[in-house]
Image (cartoon, rainbow, N blue to C red):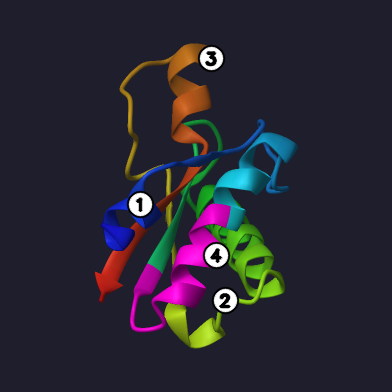
């Protein structure tokens, strides 16, 4: 159950941004509390971008997005050894489409439990 709760919830980002928005902070606090309660859980934070921009640019932006969530979770007391990061850039869209509705859902961090 804890593992499922950690994977629930996605952090979304504004265009060309990597800062954690206020509406994502409560969800990240809940993830942090669970991870602190279950120290054997390891999570991969997956940074993603919309299709605009070059592959190289989006890989770097996805990395900054994953790092923003990583840093926030560590600030909340999660052990760095419980976290890893990866950027998929624009290669892993959640939604297909060439408009703001699709793009806004693809600018995100996903959370995958990799050990528990």
User: Residue 27 colored magenta?
Assistant: no
First-in-chain label (2 vs 3): 2
Q: Which residue is mark 3?
A: 100
Residue 44 falls left or right of residue 15:
left
Measure the C-alpha gap from mark 1 to mark 3. 28 Å
Measure the C-alpha gap from mark 4 to mark 3. 30 Å
The residue nearer to you, when weighing 96 against 32, is 32
The residue nearer to you, when weighing 99 against 107, is 107
Of badges 4 and 3, the one in the foreground is 4
Q: Are marks 1 and 4 in contact (CB under 8 Å)?
A: no
Of badges 2 and 3, the one in the foreground is 2
Q: Are marks 4 and 2 in contact (CB under 8 Å)?
A: yes
Q: Residues within 10 Å of mark 2 (few under 14, many from 20)?
A: many
Q: Which residue is mark 2?
A: 78
Which x, y percent locates residue 14?
A: 66, 32
Residue 75 falls left or right of residue 6:
right
Q: Are marks 4 and 3 in contact (CB under 8 Å)?
A: no
Q: Which residue is mark 1?
A: 5
Measure the C-alpha gap from mark 2 to mark 1. 16 Å
First-in-chain label (1 vs 4): 1
Residue lying farthest bottom? 81
Q: Disc 3 on helix, strand or loop?
A: helix
The residue nearer to you, when weighing 56 against 7, is 7
Measure the C-alpha gap from mark 1 to mark 4. 11 Å
From this viewpoint, is residue 99 visible? no
Q: Is residue 56 above or below residue 35?
A: above
User: Residue 32 colored magenta?
Assistant: yes
Q: Which residue is mark 4?
A: 32
Which x, y percent locates residue 74?
A: 64, 74
Magenta residue span: 30-43
Q: Are marks 1 and 3 in contact (CB under 8 Å)?
A: no
Q: Disc 1 on helix, strand or loop?
A: helix
């Amino acid at each position: 159950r804890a593992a499922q709760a950690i994977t629930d919830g996605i952090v979304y980002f504004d265009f060309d941004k990597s800062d954690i928005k206020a509406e994502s902070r409560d969800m990240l606090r809940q993830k942090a509390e669970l991870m602190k309660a279950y120290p054997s859980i390891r999570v991969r934070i997956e940074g993603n971008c919309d299709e605009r921009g070059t592959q190289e640019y989006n890989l770097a932006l996805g990395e900054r997005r994953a790092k923003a969530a990583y840093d926030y979770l560590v600030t909340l007391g999660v052990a760095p050894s419980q976290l890893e990061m990866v950027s998929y850039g624009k290669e892993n869209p959640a939604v297909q489409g060439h408009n703001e509705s699709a793009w806004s859902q693809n600018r995100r961090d996903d959370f995958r439990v990799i050990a528990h």
